[in-house]
Amino acid sequence: DWKQFTSKIIMKNQSPVLPIFFEGQNSELFHVADKIGQVFRYSLMIYELKRRMGKKIDVHIGQRIPFETIKEIGNLIEITKFLRDSTYRLDPSNKNSILN
């Protein structure tokens, strides 16, 4: 689930967005922790970061999205969906997904 916090910040500051997709995934334990609660999830973030230290991570950077484009979308729920879709569209393994 993507939260609307980022969309709120974008709207408040009238900021453009640069979507960035990092390849990889968190451990199953991290996903379980996410279901249990935020404190447990945050405590495992350090573990997840440490697990990736020294390893290659592929990064995909999209086109800058002007604030005007985001503003036209209107409500925070739809903005959040748009940002999520714009980010996941950069995932090279999703070339056949409905997002493309």
Image: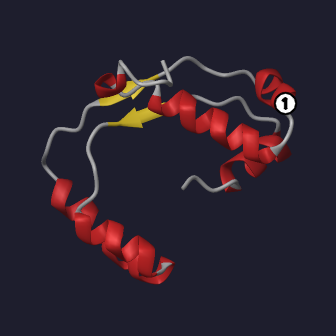
At x 71%, y 29%, the residue is 16
Position of 10 with respect to 89 (left or right) is right
On screen, residue 46 above or below 10 = below
Residue lying at the far left in this picture: please name it. 54
| Image quadrant assignment for residue 24 | top left
- Can residue 100 be seen here? The reply is yes
**What residue did someone put label 1 on?**
71
Position of 11 with respect to 94 (left or right) is right
Residue 21 position, x and y percent, is 41, 34
At x 84%, y 30%, the residue is 71
Residue 7 position, x and y percent, is 72, 46
Badge 1 element? helix
On screen, residue 3 above or below 14 = below
| Image quadrant assignment for residue 61 | top left
Residue 10 position, x and y percent, is 75, 42
Crowding at mark 1 (Cα within 10 Å: few <14, some 14-19, many 20+): some
Position of 64 with respect to 89 (left or right) is right
Q: Name the amino acid, label 1.
A: Lys
Is 9 or 89 nearer to us in this picture?
89
Where the N terminus falls, by quadrant?
A: bottom right
At x 21%, y 63%, the residue is 50
Is 90 or 45 nearer to us in this picture?
90
